[in-house]
Image: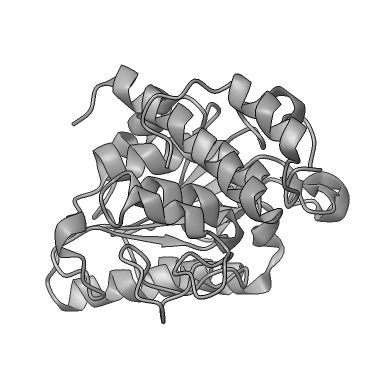
Amino acid sequence: MANINELKKLSTQVRRDIVRMVHAVSSGHPGGSLGCVEYLVALYKVVMKNDPSAFTMDGKNEDLFFLSNGHISPVFYSVLARSGYFPVEELKTFRKLNSRLQGHPTTHEGLPGVRIASGSLGQGMSVAIGAALAKKLNNDDRTVYSLHGDGELQEGQIWEAAMYASANKVDNLISTVDYNGRQIDGDVEDVLSLGNLRAKFEAFGWTVLENKNGNDIESVINSFNEAKALLGKGKPIIILMKTEMGMGIDYMMGTHKWHGSAPNDEQLAKALAQLEETEKDY
Protein backbone atom coordinates (compact mmCIF):
# COMPACT_ATOMS: atom_id res chain seq x y z
CA MET A 1 0.00 0.00 0.00
CA ALA A 2 1.23 3.47 -0.87
CA ASN A 3 1.95 5.80 2.04
CA ILE A 4 -0.13 8.92 2.63
CA ASN A 5 2.38 11.28 1.01
CA GLU A 6 2.49 9.12 -2.11
CA LEU A 7 -1.31 9.08 -2.24
CA LYS A 8 -1.43 12.86 -1.92
CA LYS A 9 1.10 13.25 -4.73
CA LEU A 10 -0.90 10.89 -6.92
CA SER A 11 -4.04 12.89 -6.17
CA THR A 12 -2.31 16.04 -7.40
CA GLN A 13 -1.25 14.30 -10.61
CA VAL A 14 -4.77 13.00 -11.18
CA ARG A 15 -6.02 16.57 -10.94
CA ARG A 16 -3.49 17.58 -13.60
CA ASP A 17 -4.77 14.77 -15.80
CA ILE A 18 -8.37 15.90 -15.36
CA VAL A 19 -7.89 19.51 -16.42
CA ARG A 20 -5.57 18.57 -19.29
CA MET A 21 -8.04 15.99 -20.61
CA VAL A 22 -11.06 18.29 -20.67
CA HIS A 23 -9.01 21.21 -22.00
CA ALA A 24 -7.67 19.18 -24.93
CA VAL A 25 -11.14 18.59 -26.36
CA SER A 26 -12.91 21.64 -24.89
CA SER A 27 -15.51 19.41 -23.26
CA GLY A 28 -16.05 17.30 -20.19
CA HIS A 29 -16.84 17.64 -16.51
CA PRO A 30 -13.91 18.88 -14.41
CA GLY A 31 -15.78 20.13 -11.32
CA GLY A 32 -17.09 16.90 -9.85
CA SER A 33 -14.06 15.00 -11.12
CA LEU A 34 -11.72 17.22 -9.13
CA GLY A 35 -13.89 16.79 -6.05
CA CYS A 36 -13.81 12.99 -6.13
CA VAL A 37 -10.06 12.48 -6.57
CA GLU A 38 -9.32 11.35 -3.02
CA TYR A 39 -12.27 8.96 -3.02
CA LEU A 40 -11.12 7.11 -6.15
CA VAL A 41 -7.41 7.18 -5.27
CA ALA A 42 -8.19 5.70 -1.85
CA LEU A 43 -10.53 3.12 -3.34
CA TYR A 44 -8.17 1.81 -6.01
CA LYS A 45 -4.85 2.22 -4.20
CA VAL A 46 -5.80 1.18 -0.67
CA VAL A 47 -9.30 -0.18 -0.16
CA MET A 48 -10.29 -2.56 -2.94
CA LYS A 49 -8.99 -6.01 -3.68
CA ASN A 50 -8.51 -5.78 -7.42
CA ASP A 51 -6.04 -6.99 -10.05
CA PRO A 52 -5.61 -4.60 -13.01
CA SER A 53 -3.49 -7.14 -14.90
CA ALA A 54 -6.24 -9.76 -14.84
CA PHE A 55 -9.38 -7.69 -15.37
CA THR A 56 -12.54 -9.65 -16.21
CA MET A 57 -16.10 -8.45 -16.63
CA ASP A 58 -17.47 -10.87 -14.04
CA GLY A 59 -14.98 -9.81 -11.34
CA LYS A 60 -15.17 -13.06 -9.42
CA ASN A 61 -13.28 -13.00 -6.11
CA GLU A 62 -12.57 -9.30 -6.56
CA ASP A 63 -14.10 -6.17 -5.13
CA LEU A 64 -16.19 -4.31 -7.70
CA PHE A 65 -16.75 -0.59 -8.26
CA PHE A 66 -19.57 1.04 -10.20
CA LEU A 67 -19.47 4.73 -11.11
CA SER A 68 -23.08 5.87 -11.26
CA ASN A 69 -22.44 9.58 -11.92
CA GLY A 70 -20.60 8.72 -15.11
CA HIS A 71 -20.06 12.30 -16.24
CA ILE A 72 -17.05 12.47 -13.88
CA SER A 73 -15.29 10.03 -16.19
CA PRO A 74 -12.04 12.09 -16.29
CA VAL A 75 -11.16 11.22 -12.68
CA PHE A 76 -12.22 7.59 -13.22
CA TYR A 77 -10.06 7.21 -16.33
CA SER A 78 -7.05 8.88 -14.73
CA VAL A 79 -7.15 6.67 -11.63
CA LEU A 80 -7.70 3.53 -13.70
CA ALA A 81 -4.75 4.37 -15.95
CA ARG A 82 -2.46 5.26 -13.05
CA SER A 83 -3.48 2.03 -11.32
CA GLY A 84 -2.36 -0.04 -14.31
CA TYR A 85 -5.62 -0.87 -16.07
CA PHE A 86 -4.50 0.67 -19.37
CA PRO A 87 -1.59 2.87 -20.53
CA VAL A 88 -1.49 6.40 -19.12
CA GLU A 89 -0.67 7.58 -22.65
CA GLU A 90 -4.22 6.63 -23.68
CA LEU A 91 -5.62 9.49 -21.60
CA LYS A 92 -4.80 11.80 -24.52
CA THR A 93 -7.60 10.11 -26.53
CA PHE A 94 -10.32 11.27 -24.10
CA ARG A 95 -13.60 12.09 -25.89
CA LYS A 96 -12.07 11.66 -29.35
CA LEU A 97 -13.59 9.66 -32.19
CA ASN A 98 -13.06 5.90 -31.86
CA SER A 99 -11.51 6.32 -28.41
CA ARG A 100 -12.14 3.83 -25.62
CA LEU A 101 -12.37 6.84 -23.29
CA GLN A 102 -15.76 8.29 -24.17
CA GLY A 103 -17.33 11.19 -22.29
CA HIS A 104 -19.41 8.74 -20.31
CA PRO A 105 -17.86 5.32 -19.66
CA THR A 106 -19.11 2.61 -22.00
CA THR A 107 -18.42 -1.10 -22.34
CA HIS A 108 -18.43 -1.95 -26.05
CA GLU A 109 -14.91 -0.52 -26.51
CA GLY A 110 -13.62 -3.04 -23.95
CA LEU A 111 -11.83 -0.59 -21.67
CA PRO A 112 -10.37 -2.48 -18.68
CA GLY A 113 -11.85 -1.34 -15.39
CA VAL A 114 -15.24 -0.40 -16.82
CA ARG A 115 -18.03 -2.93 -16.26
CA ILE A 116 -21.12 -0.84 -17.06
CA ALA A 117 -22.04 2.08 -19.26
CA SER A 118 -22.89 4.97 -16.97
CA GLY A 119 -24.01 8.53 -17.26
CA SER A 120 -27.76 8.06 -17.35
CA LEU A 121 -28.13 9.14 -13.76
CA GLY A 122 -29.92 7.05 -11.16
CA GLN A 123 -29.03 3.60 -12.46
CA GLY A 124 -25.74 2.72 -10.80
CA MET A 125 -27.13 1.75 -7.42
CA SER A 126 -29.45 -0.79 -9.03
CA VAL A 127 -26.52 -2.33 -10.88
CA ALA A 128 -24.37 -2.41 -7.76
CA ILE A 129 -27.14 -4.13 -5.81
CA GLY A 130 -27.48 -6.75 -8.54
CA ALA A 131 -23.73 -7.38 -8.49
CA ALA A 132 -23.75 -7.63 -4.69
CA LEU A 133 -26.59 -10.17 -4.78
CA ALA A 134 -24.74 -12.17 -7.44
CA LYS A 135 -21.71 -12.36 -5.16
CA LYS A 136 -23.91 -13.69 -2.37
CA LEU A 137 -25.38 -16.34 -4.66
CA ASN A 138 -21.88 -17.35 -5.78
CA ASN A 139 -20.52 -17.47 -2.21
CA ASP A 140 -18.10 -14.73 -3.20
CA ASP A 141 -17.20 -12.78 -0.07
CA ARG A 142 -15.86 -9.69 -1.82
CA THR A 143 -17.45 -6.23 -1.56
CA VAL A 144 -19.27 -4.02 -4.07
CA TYR A 145 -18.75 -0.23 -4.07
CA SER A 146 -20.67 2.50 -5.88
CA LEU A 147 -20.41 6.29 -6.17
CA HIS A 148 -23.29 8.70 -6.73
CA GLY A 149 -23.72 12.44 -7.13
CA ASP A 150 -25.93 14.30 -4.69
CA GLY A 151 -27.94 15.79 -7.54
CA GLU A 152 -28.36 12.25 -8.84
CA LEU A 153 -30.38 11.44 -5.73
CA GLN A 154 -33.18 13.50 -7.27
CA GLU A 155 -33.77 10.46 -9.51
CA GLY A 156 -36.56 8.19 -8.31
CA GLN A 157 -34.79 4.96 -9.25
CA ILE A 158 -32.23 5.60 -6.51
CA TRP A 159 -34.92 5.36 -3.86
CA GLU A 160 -36.50 2.25 -5.36
CA ALA A 161 -33.05 0.66 -5.29
CA ALA A 162 -32.42 1.84 -1.72
CA MET A 163 -35.69 0.28 -0.58
CA TYR A 164 -34.88 -2.98 -2.36
CA ALA A 165 -31.36 -3.21 -0.92
CA SER A 166 -32.47 -2.96 2.69
CA ALA A 167 -35.47 -5.26 2.20
CA ASN A 168 -33.14 -7.91 0.79
CA LYS A 169 -30.35 -7.36 3.33
CA VAL A 170 -27.72 -6.47 0.74
CA ASP A 171 -25.01 -6.09 3.37
CA ASN A 172 -21.99 -6.51 1.08
CA LEU A 173 -22.51 -3.09 -0.53
CA ILE A 174 -20.85 0.24 0.35
CA SER A 175 -22.31 3.16 -1.59
CA THR A 176 -21.05 6.72 -1.34
CA VAL A 177 -22.70 10.03 -2.14
CA ASP A 178 -20.45 12.83 -3.41
CA TYR A 179 -22.13 15.51 -1.32
CA ASN A 180 -20.71 18.69 -2.85
CA GLY A 181 -24.04 20.54 -2.81
CA ARG A 182 -23.86 21.59 -6.47
CA GLN A 183 -25.22 20.34 -9.79
CA ILE A 184 -25.22 21.64 -13.34
CA ASP A 185 -27.95 24.26 -12.83
CA GLY A 186 -26.87 25.56 -9.43
CA ASP A 187 -26.90 24.57 -5.79
CA VAL A 188 -28.71 21.32 -5.08
CA GLU A 189 -30.66 23.07 -2.32
CA ASP A 190 -32.06 25.54 -4.86
CA VAL A 191 -32.73 23.08 -7.71
CA LEU A 192 -34.46 20.39 -5.62
CA SER A 193 -33.61 20.11 -1.95
CA LEU A 194 -32.64 16.66 -0.71
CA GLY A 195 -33.68 17.42 2.84
CA ASN A 196 -32.14 15.33 5.60
CA LEU A 197 -30.28 12.64 3.68
CA ARG A 198 -29.10 10.82 6.76
CA ALA A 199 -32.65 10.52 8.09
CA LYS A 200 -33.93 9.42 4.67
CA PHE A 201 -31.42 6.61 4.21
CA GLU A 202 -31.88 5.49 7.79
CA ALA A 203 -35.63 5.41 7.20
CA PHE A 204 -34.96 3.25 4.14
CA GLY A 205 -33.08 0.78 6.34
CA TRP A 206 -29.47 1.67 5.55
CA THR A 207 -26.52 2.14 7.88
CA VAL A 208 -25.36 5.72 7.33
CA LEU A 209 -21.87 7.12 7.87
CA GLU A 210 -20.84 10.72 7.34
CA ASN A 211 -17.50 12.08 6.20
CA LYS A 212 -17.20 15.84 6.44
CA ASN A 213 -13.82 15.97 4.69
CA GLY A 214 -13.95 13.87 1.54
CA ASN A 215 -10.96 15.74 0.12
CA ASP A 216 -8.62 14.46 2.82
CA ILE A 217 -7.17 11.10 1.79
CA GLU A 218 -6.68 9.85 5.35
CA SER A 219 -10.25 10.75 6.26
CA VAL A 220 -11.57 8.90 3.21
CA ILE A 221 -9.57 5.77 4.03
CA ASN A 222 -10.84 5.90 7.62
CA SER A 223 -14.43 6.11 6.40
CA PHE A 224 -13.94 3.09 4.18
CA ASN A 225 -12.43 1.14 7.07
CA GLU A 226 -15.34 2.10 9.30
CA ALA A 227 -17.79 0.99 6.62
CA LYS A 228 -15.99 -2.32 6.01
CA ALA A 229 -16.26 -3.13 9.71
CA LEU A 230 -20.05 -2.95 9.34
CA LEU A 231 -20.34 -5.37 6.40
CA GLY A 232 -22.32 -8.55 6.89
CA LYS A 233 -24.63 -7.11 9.53
CA GLY A 234 -27.86 -7.23 7.52
CA LYS A 235 -27.89 -3.67 6.16
CA PRO A 236 -26.46 -1.89 3.11
CA ILE A 237 -24.06 0.93 3.99
CA ILE A 238 -23.86 4.44 2.62
CA ILE A 239 -21.25 7.14 3.22
CA LEU A 240 -22.37 10.75 2.86
CA MET A 241 -19.08 12.34 1.79
CA LYS A 242 -18.72 16.12 1.81
CA THR A 243 -16.45 17.32 -1.00
CA GLU A 244 -15.67 20.56 -2.80
CA MET A 245 -16.49 20.76 -6.50
CA GLY A 246 -13.38 21.93 -8.37
CA MET A 247 -11.11 21.05 -5.44
CA GLY A 248 -7.46 22.02 -5.90
CA ILE A 249 -8.01 24.87 -8.37
CA ASP A 250 -8.95 28.14 -6.71
CA TYR A 251 -11.12 29.62 -9.47
CA MET A 252 -13.12 26.41 -9.88
CA MET A 253 -14.02 26.08 -6.21
CA GLY A 254 -17.12 27.59 -4.61
CA THR A 255 -19.26 27.50 -7.75
CA HIS A 256 -21.28 25.12 -9.91
CA LYS A 257 -20.08 26.76 -13.12
CA TRP A 258 -17.29 24.23 -13.70
CA HIS A 259 -19.63 21.25 -13.48
CA GLY A 260 -19.42 20.77 -17.25
CA SER A 261 -17.14 23.51 -18.61
CA ALA A 262 -13.61 23.10 -19.91
CA PRO A 263 -10.80 25.59 -19.19
CA ASN A 264 -9.31 27.61 -22.04
CA ASP A 265 -5.56 27.88 -22.61
CA GLU A 266 -5.05 30.64 -20.05
CA GLN A 267 -7.23 28.93 -17.46
CA LEU A 268 -5.41 25.64 -17.98
CA ALA A 269 -2.05 27.30 -17.40
CA LYS A 270 -3.37 28.87 -14.22
CA ALA A 271 -4.72 25.51 -13.02
CA LEU A 272 -1.50 23.62 -13.75
CA ALA A 273 0.50 26.29 -11.92
CA GLN A 274 -1.42 25.30 -8.79
CA LEU A 275 -0.81 21.57 -9.30
CA GLU A 276 2.77 20.31 -9.17
CA GLU A 277 3.61 17.50 -11.60
CA THR A 278 4.25 14.50 -9.32
CA GLU A 279 4.24 11.74 -11.88
CA LYS A 280 4.96 12.09 -15.58
CA ASP A 281 2.24 13.87 -17.54
CA TYR A 282 0.91 11.80 -20.41
Which residue shows up at 48% across the image and 69% down it? 99
Q: Work out whether residue 105 or residue 213 is closer to the camera in this orientation and state it.
A: 105
- Please state the horizontal and vertical placement of residue 249, each as a whole percent of the image: 66, 27
Where's the N terminus, which quadrant?
Answer: top left
Is residue 63 rendered to the left or right of residue 131?
left
Where 90 sits versus 272, above or below? below
Q: Is residue 162 above or below residue 185?
A: below
Residue, far right: 190
Q: What is the quadrant of the C terminus in the image? A: top left
Up/down of 176 relative to 131, above or below = above
How far from the left and from the top, in percent, is residue 91?
45, 53
Q: Does the rendering let one see residue 175? A: no
Quadrant of residue 34 within the rendered picture:
top right
Camera-side residue of 106 and 62: 106
Question: Which residue is pictured at 55% across the width and 28% down the height?
Answer: 212
| Relative image position of residue 57 (x, y in whole percent) | 26, 75
- Residue 281 lies in quadrant: top left
